[in-house]
């Protein structure tokens, strides 16, 4: 019978049915970081259990690392305790740790793919909701809680309910100035922030066929913002080309066998989906959020909604969002003065994101009142960017060039908004308080739109700012 | 190994207004710099409850009438956002034992269930009715019948919902699956042997 990738990977990893009817699912690859793992190792010690498959467990440190100091101990004693705890746990349990001195540290969802750990046809879990990123390679990749991190450490499995699968086709051609970030913001806006609950999203169609791996990762990354715990793209030549030669990928004859196996996991053309959504690429324009969840988004040339414009069910949420954002219903979003521009996060801090921005900002200057920071997703991204001279372009434009980490996406390190600052951000969440200040305000957008806002000092249409022959 | 069955939660309720309450709201990230979950209860809904100068905002969670509540009553898509178990842990450590909401984000729901904290879903009209009743009679007892999926308060009885796997886990005392997962060790090895990538780190 024809099957989707989700069903094939699920069936290949299903161990048995548990007494409560859930499935015990083998998790092939376990990624861990400093914030959600210490309690799990604590529970493991209480149970006197080893890590079941240490060679399938990989760690890095990302959430709490300062991006402007590299010497230890960190000035934040709590952050210092967390990195030391992870180091101790990895040593004691024999887990590979991409520590800060390895040259391979970075955001866990950037490190996994670039090291070749993230592979098609596998199951991946990590104590972080943006684990869906790894689905870009045709894996079932799940964000999990800390008790489940314990479960995976101890048994390499977890208890799960099978998800339904919704196929989302985006066909046609994206207009110039429209990026992968706009595609996923549009999907979330259309299907809702909880529209994906109970589903895995399978992204496909002509736009995804043409997308690079980094673009696919941007979309899969934000699946959870639409309520879908899992998002994936079927593996194809683009996937294999990206993985070839990466450190943790099979080599030689094993490579050929792996590619053949990986290919077989792709959804069968005639498989049945629980739901299908069709989107035309031409519908999508550069998108920005105006509110306090990623579904509260509009095109750059649209106005912020009025409470009267929306259904009674949404009204309370719109009023709360307008109040927090200090916007009036009906305001154009374009022209809102920003204080901070943040280019970073597991959504948009990969090499291609930095390259695309650098191409437009060369020779331009960040507006004097704006604090602009660029935080590469990993040390590898940073190193390649430096080799290409991108750091110089960013610095000359007035950006601060920082070390790798999650940084101001969730502000567990010293990079935070102050007071009610307004931030143009390439990250994934605009929740109240997300960027470190309870009254701070976040507007999500693509990296190029962040750059446009940084340069003009206000929310802007990048197509108008960067008068490029391919744009506007 | 079975744990204590969780068949019923009885207690007073406190309304938490708003839909799409995210996990950053439930526990701001700055309070996650910890290596244990102990003490997280103090920071539950911190920025919702407190001003930046530390004074208390007007919010039901600060209202003395609801101080004895052990059940949160919330809107739709409760617990959306991050996978941080710190969110249900903070709720639990602050003394709450169940959440009634119009709907739950998936990862939050799983994390809460695994702690033995039932999350039951009700339609919007029923949530509104319940909130009205709580506001007029804060000491009213609410009974969540996990086994029968009923909600009883003030002489009323209503249906509520929970995913079957979660319900049976709670009722049978299997809400923490670690013992069941460990029992499957031999079957795990058999599945791992069939998957080439499980034998090495490549």
Image: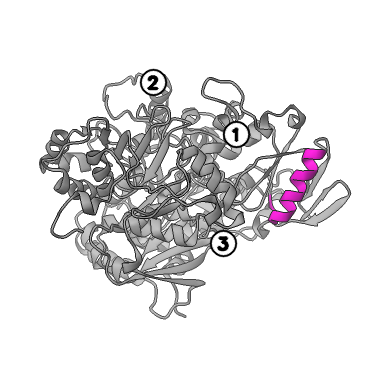
The magenta stretch spans residue B121: yes
Depth check: give the residue in front, A464 or B188: A464
With A273 as the anchor, is B64 left or right in this view?
A: right
Residue bearing the label numbered 1 = B90
Q: Residues within 10 Å of mark 2 (few under 14, many from 20)?
A: some
The residue segment tinted magenta is B120-136
Measure how far apart labels 1 and 2 are at the Cα level. 23 Å
- For the question of whether residue A124 can be seen, the reply is no
- Residue B178 position (above or below residue A234): above
Q: CA distance from mark 1 to mark 3?
A: 32 Å
Residue furthest out toward the right: B155
Q: Is residue A21 left or right of residue A147?
A: right
Question: Which dot, 1 or 3, sits closer to the camera?
Answer: 1
The chain ID associated with circle 2 is A
* CA–CA distance in space, label 2 to label 3: 45 Å
Q: Is A293 a magenta residue?
A: no
- Residue A58, located in which quarter of the rendered image? top left
Q: Describe the colour scheme in one phrase.
A: one colour
In this figure, which residue is indicated by the disc labeled 3?
A: A16
Q: Are marks 2 and 3 in contact (CB under 8 Å)?
A: no
| Residue located at (14% from left, 55% from top) | A468
């Amino acid at each position: 019978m024809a099957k989707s990738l989700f069903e094939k990977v699920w069936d290949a990893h299903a161990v048995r049915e548990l007494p409560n009817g859930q499935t015990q699912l083998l998790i092939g690859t376990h990624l861990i970081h400093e914030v959600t793992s210490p309690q799990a190792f604590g529970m493991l010690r209480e149970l006197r259990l080893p890590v079941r498959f240490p060679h399938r467990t990989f760690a890095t440190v990302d959430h709490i690392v300062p991006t402007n100091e590299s010497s230890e101990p960190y000035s934040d004693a709590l952050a210092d305790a967390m990195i030391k705890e992870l180091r101790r746990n990895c040593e004691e349990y024999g887990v590979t740790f991409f520590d800060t001195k390895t040259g391979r540290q970075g955001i866990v969802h950037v490190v996994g793919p670039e090291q070749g750990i993230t592979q098609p046809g596998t199951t991946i879990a990590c104590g972080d909701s943006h684990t869906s990123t790894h689905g870009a390679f045709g894996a079932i990749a799940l964000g999990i809680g800390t008790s489940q991190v314990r479960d995976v450490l101890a048994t390499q499995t977890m208890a799960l309910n099978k998800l339904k699968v919704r196929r989302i086709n985006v066909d046609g051609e994206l207009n110039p100035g429209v990026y992968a970030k706009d595609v996923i913001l549009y999907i979330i806006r259309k299907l809702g922030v909880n529209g994906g609950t109970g589903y895995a999203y399978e992204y496909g169609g002509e736009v995804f066929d043409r997308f690079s791996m980094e673009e696919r990762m941007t979309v899969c990354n934000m699946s959870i913002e639409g309520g879908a715990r899992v998002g994936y793209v079927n593996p194809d030549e683009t996937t294999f080309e990206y993985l070839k030669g990466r450190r943790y990928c099979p080599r030689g004859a094993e490579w050929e066998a792996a590619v053949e196996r990986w290919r077989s996991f792709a959804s069968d053309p005639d498989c049945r989906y629980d739901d299908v959504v069709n989107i035309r690429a031409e519908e999508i324009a550069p998108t920005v959020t105006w509110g306090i969840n990623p579904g509260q988004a509009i095109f750059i040339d649209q106005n912020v909604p009025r409470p009267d414009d929306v259904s009674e069910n949404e009204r309370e949420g719109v009023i709360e969002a307008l109040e927090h954002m200090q916007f009036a219903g009906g305001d154009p979003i374009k022209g809102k003065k920003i204080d901070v521009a943040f280019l970073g996060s597991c959504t948009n801090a990969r090499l291609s994101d930095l390259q695309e921005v650098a191409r437009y900002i060369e020779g331009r200057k960040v507006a004097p009142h704006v604090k602009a920071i660029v935080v590469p997703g990993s040390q590898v991204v940073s190193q390649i960017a430096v080799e290409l001279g991108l750091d110089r372009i960013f610095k000359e434009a007035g950006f601060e060039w920082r070390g790798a980490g999650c940084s101001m996406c969730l502000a567990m390190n010293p990079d935070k908004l102050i007071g009610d600052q307004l931030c143009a951000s390439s990250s994934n969440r605009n929740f109240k308080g997300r960027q470190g200040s309870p009254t701070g305000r976040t507007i999500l957008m693509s990296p190029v739109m962040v750059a446009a806002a940084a340069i003009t000092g206000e929310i802007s249409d990048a197509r108008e700012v960067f008068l490029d022959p391919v744009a506007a | 190994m079975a744990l204590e069955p969780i068949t019923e939660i009885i207690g007073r309720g406190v309304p938490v207004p708003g839909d799409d309450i995210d996990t950053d709201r439930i526990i701001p990230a700055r309070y996650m710099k910890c290596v244990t979950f102990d003490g997280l209860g103090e920071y539950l809904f911190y920025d919702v409850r407190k001003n930046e100068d530390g004074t208390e905002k007007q919010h039901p969670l600060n209202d003395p009438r609801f101080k004895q509540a052990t059940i949160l009553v919330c809107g739709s898509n409760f617990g959306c956002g991050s996978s941080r178990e710190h969110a249900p842990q903070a709720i639990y450590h602050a003394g709450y034992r169940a959440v009634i909401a119009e709907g739950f984000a998936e990862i939050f729901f799983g994390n809460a269930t695994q702690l033995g904290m039932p999350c039951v879903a009700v339609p919007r009209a029923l949530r509104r009715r319940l909130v009205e009743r709580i506001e007029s009679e804060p000491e009213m007892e609410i009974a969540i019948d996990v086994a029968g999926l009923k909600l009883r308060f003030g002489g009323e009885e209503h249906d509520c919902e929970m995913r079957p796997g979660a319900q049976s886990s709670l009722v049978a005392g299997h809400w923490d699956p670690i013992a069941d997962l460990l029992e499957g060790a031999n079957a795990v090895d058999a599945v791992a042997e069939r998957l080439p990538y499980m034998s090495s780190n490549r």
